[in-house]
Image (cartoon, rainbow, N blue to C red):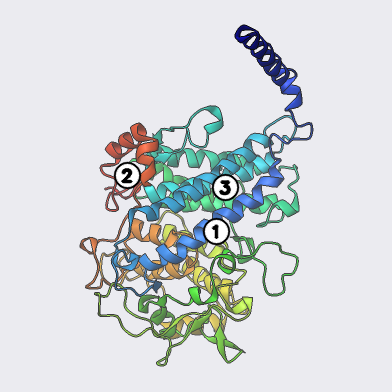
Amino acid sequence: MKNIFTVTLAVWTALYFTSCTKDFEKINTDPISITSAAPEKLLAPALVNMLTTNMVRNRNFNNELMQVTVTMSEDENAVFRYDFRPNIADYTWNGWYSQLTNFRDIYAVASTEEYQNDSYKGIALICEAWGFSLLTDTYGDVPFSQANKGNEGIVEPAFDAQKDIYMGLFDKLEEANTLLTGSTASVVESSDPIYKGDVSLWRKFGNSLYLRLLLRVSGKAEVSTDVIAKIEEIIESNPTKYPTFASNDESAVLKWAGGTVTTNPFTSPYAILLREIDFTIPSLCNFFILKLSNWHDPRIEMLAPYGNGTRNRLGVAPGSGGFIGIESGYEPGMAEQKQAYFYAFGTSDFSLHKSPLTGILMTYAEVEFIKAEAAAKDWINSSASDHYYRGIANAIHYWVPAFTTDIADNEFTDYIDYANIEWNDALPLDAPTGDSQMERLHIQKYYCLFMTDFQQWFEHRRTGHPILPKGDGLQNGKKLPVRLNYPIYVQSANSVNYKKAVANMGADNINTLVWWQKP
């Protein structure tokens, strides 16, 4: 009986597994499955998710370090005191790398025989250069050449040296410019929330980004000659080959739904992720708000009544004493009374919480400030003061469309005279303290870069400007952090390559200079 049962069980087992494996692949293949997404399905979500990461950390990290806001706290781990938990580094690392996978997929799919679309390929390369520049400027050496290749079996990618990454970014932007030059391949308008399929504007963004990245490494002696020559070529010798932004309308901005924009499906991450009360928690910092107040700057000038008070372009709420913030870096227990802060309510035109204007990748005003620095350093043969003034005018115009962009207009010249921020060729080019051409330029560029991911922090690390006051409560030896540490999980998930990267850089901490900062 036992033998009969054993034989019967064996037969049934054989039949069972035979029936399970028969036509297995045929049965388990979805006849309508999509194994890869078309480029037009990937671009908009990737851009939205990248900007979401940027805007969240701009608000609660960059702005706190760079004295735009102060989230008042008596606790340890306050960013404005240069003291924060290591896990703050995880969010940007994860957010940027996940979307870089999508940008690389766009390029790969657009390169196939089925799609073959040079326009999407060029756009994907520009977005890759943008994303990887954020990563390397934040962390230093990062996975680049082997990154985002898990489907190829590379799950522990090597870290590339920052110099090699930058050379790779320049190659990507050169290739993108070539691909987009005269490309007739169409881009689905709804897939492109920035330029609505206008390839010529993507090309201008790519070359404007090229200028940003060239300027960032221009201080490195080993590459400066070639870098400065390329800056001159783009701006002066061959602008037809390398067109850049020529007006605010060409700025790379994902304009969120709001105001009269009724057909836009993209809602600001601030409106989704933050309650209105959350947005009002940080106080404005005196460094940020007092200059605008003293200049009578239109960006905070009272423009229109709304509700039970008066609203203004940046949505700033004045305190009882006017537009007054608090000092950053104060000692625990020494906080001043909170006064000015950003409004979180009102119409979308007057509230950063819901503003269409906060999805910034790069603006035309930034390009003018890049040109002003190049002219001041005699890299190009044009007027530093004209570029400086156009940078100011267009930085204001971005937030206040009624403000003139004509630097000869009385509205603009009166503003410059009252604010006493004239360009002065008699000043020293640069100085570690006090007034200089670079200090004046970078104070204005600081406001131009408002709401633009970590660019205020990156530019301060590159130049030392604008000169920030240092409160008595600062930690870290009162030294501004110059990078974020690698995420903790990377130490175990990619330990061999992590250790090589740390050995190459020097140490994995917030005071280790990245390549372009080292002497």
- Tell me where residue 250 sits by quadrant: bottom right
Seen from the viewer's position, the closer of residues 23 and 398 is 23
Instruction: Classify residue 110 as left or right of residue 511.
Output: right
Q: SS of the residue at dot 3?
A: helix
Q: Earlier in the sequence, mark 2 or mark 1?
A: 1
Q: Position of residue 153 (x, y in %)?
A: 51, 27
396 up-or-down from 264: above or below: below
Q: Earlier in the sequence, mark 1 or mark 3?
A: 1
Q: SS of the residue at dot 1?
A: helix
- Tell me where residue 82 sits by quadrant: bottom left
Q: Amino acid at mark 2?
A: Ala
Q: Position of residue 252 (x, y in %)?
A: 60, 58
Instruction: Classify residue 392 as left or right of residue 440.
Output: right
Q: Amino acid at mark 1?
A: Thr
Q: Residue at x 50, y 45 (%)?
A: 97
Q: Earlier in the sequence, mark 2 or mark 3?
A: 3
Q: Position of residue 433 (x, y in %)?
A: 25, 68
Residue 52's label in the rendered image is 1
The residue under label 3 is 127
The residue under label 2 is 221
Residue 236 visible in the snapshot = no
Work out how far the residue at label 2 is from the one at label 1, CA to CA, in angstroms.
36 Å
Seen from the viewer's position, the closer of residues 514 and 374 is 514
Q: Position of residue 198 (x, y in %)?
A: 71, 53
Q: Amino acid at mark 3?
A: Cys
